[in-house]
Image (tube, helix red, strand yellow):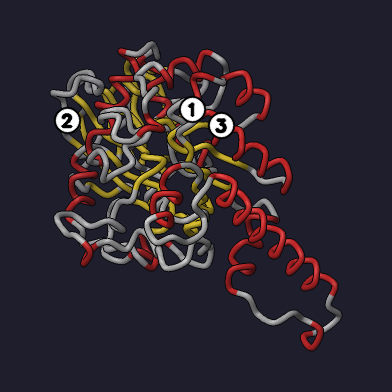
């Protein structure tokens, strides 16, 4: 299939191709070029001057793990019976039949990171997945992160039960304790000459081994600046590849974050300041971070903001000082880079998954919707 006569925002060094085409075969992009293709068949699509973009990627959501219109019955986000649960896997809580997946596709969102929640100091492994499919295993792209949480959420959950962690100190201590145990467990496993010398199986430690080896990233839920610094501190201690999620006060300490080389997934911003640690929420944050050379993505934190409104969140970032191209980058290639999936998605380039969308007008205009969305080369909207 060929899509031609399009304004292509490649999100690569090729920049914007004012009049070009792409070829798609077996779910992959096989050609990106300027001008018109040599031949056109009946199955090919005339974009008629539309804007062609990579599918949007929401780098932090709870899509499918917090189900549409349900309370406890559809809430599989937090296993709040234990404040440290790295052995939980988001893939086991996702319901692909959730109607919000269809709304995501209608909004041009072709992939998301869906995550356990932030009730626990460690909530479990996070899943990057496509938004089309009937089985989470088929929709899965990879396990790309382990979820940690600092600040008010663990404090509020466990203070209400008169259990630890009731302070920021205890939350950080729980994370350290779990990581130290996993580090020793891994060392014992590597030192064992045969199966008889292996330590007793520990599901929590096993789940943290990919993190300690650098195969996945540590995603830290943080709002306040001091919590961001704690996340950076813990990441340094254990040599973790860290990501700051939310980063409400990240704009107050951009030099610290830049020096640490830690990316930030900003959001939600299209919401109220619903708790004390969000008092400094501003739409200017993402733009400030970008100006300081910090890798930045924008998220909805669905269900906080419905996932299909990620473009509206990006538009607010533009209002707050980001350029339009930076905002689009932050929900395509930039998001993919932070998630470690930019070898498959986030840009229009040869070899990438054919996750694409077409707009008649400016995609950052909240009145606009894509008129065509494809995931893995298949029309889904």
Q: Nearer the viewer, mark 2 or mark 3?
A: 3
Instruction: Say which residue label 1 marks.
Output: 296
Instruction: Say which residue label 3 marks.
Output: 226
Q: Nearer the viewer, mark 1 or mark 2?
A: 1
Q: Is residue 151 above or below residue 266?
A: below
Q: Residues within 10 Å of mark 1 (few under 14, many from 20)?
A: many
Q: CA distance from mark 1 to mark 2?
A: 24 Å
Q: Could you tell me if residue 64 is visible in this image?
A: yes
Name of the residue lying farthest toward the bottom: 196
Residue 86 coordinates in the image, percent (x, y): 53, 62
The image quarter containing residue 55 is top left
Q: Secondary structure at mark 1?
A: strand
> Foreground residue, 89 or 103?
89
The image quarter containing residue 309 is top left
Whether residues under marks 1 and 2 lie with C-beta atoms below 8 angstroms apart, the answer is no
Whether residues under marks 1 and 3 lie with C-beta atoms below 8 angstroms apart, the answer is no
Closer to the N terminus: mark 1 or mark 3?
A: 3
Closer to the N terminus: mark 2 or mark 3?
A: 3
Residue 8 coordinates in the image, percent (x, y): 35, 23
Residue 84 coordinates in the image, percent (x, y): 53, 62
Closer to the N terminus: mark 1 or mark 2?
A: 1
Instruction: Say which residue label 2 marks.
Output: 369
**Residue at 61% in and 54% down:** 175
**Residue at 33% in and 41% down:** 301
């Amino acid at each position: 299939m060929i899509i031609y006569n399009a304004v292509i925002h490649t999100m690569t060094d090729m920049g914007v191709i004012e009049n070009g085409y792409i070829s798609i075969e077996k779910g992959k992009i096989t050609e990106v070029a300027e001008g018109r293709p040599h031949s056109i068949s009946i199955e090919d699509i005339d974009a008629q001057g539309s804007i062609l973009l990579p599918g949007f990627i929401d780098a932090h959501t709870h899509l499918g793990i917090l189900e549409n219109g349900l309370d406890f019955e559809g809430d599989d986000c937090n296993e709040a019976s234990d404040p440290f649960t790295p052995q939980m896997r988001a893939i086991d809580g996702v319901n692909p039949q959730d109607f919000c997946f269809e709304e995501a596709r209608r909004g041009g969102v072709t992939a998301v990171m869906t995550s356990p929640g932030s009730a626990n100091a460690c909530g479990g492994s996070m899943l990057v997945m496509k938004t089309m499919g009937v089985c989470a295993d088929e929709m899965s792209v990879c396990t790309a992160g382990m979820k940690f949480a600092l600040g008010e959420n663990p404090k509020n959950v466990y203070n209400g039960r008169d259990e630890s962690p009731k302070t920021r100190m205890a939350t950080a201590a729980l994370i350290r304790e779990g990581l130290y145990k996993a580090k020793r467990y891994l060392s014992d496993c590597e030192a064992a000459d045969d199966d008889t010398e292996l330590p007793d199986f520990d599901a929590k430690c096993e789940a943290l081994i990919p993190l300690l080896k650098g195969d996945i990233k540590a995603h830290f839920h943080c709002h306040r600046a001091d919590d961001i610094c704690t996340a950076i501190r813990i990441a340094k201690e254990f040599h973790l590849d860290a990501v700051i999620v939310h980063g409400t006060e990240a704009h107050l300490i951009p030099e610290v974050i830049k020096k640490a080389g830690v990316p930030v997934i900003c959001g939600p911003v299209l919401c109220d300041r619903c708790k004390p640690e969000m008092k400094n929420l501003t739409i200017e944050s993402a733009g400030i971070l970008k100006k300081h050379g910090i890798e930045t993505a924008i998220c909805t934190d669905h269900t906080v903001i419905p996932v299909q409104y990620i473009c509206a969140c990006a538009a607010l970032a533009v209002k707050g000082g980001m350029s339009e191209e930076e905002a689009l980058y932050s929900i395509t290639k930039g998001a993919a880079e932070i998630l470690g999936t930019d070898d498959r998605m986030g840009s229009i380039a040869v070899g990438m998954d054919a996750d694409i969308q077409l707009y008649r007008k400016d995609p950052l205009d909240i009145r606009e919707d894509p008129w065509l969305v494809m995931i893995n080369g298949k029309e889904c909207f």
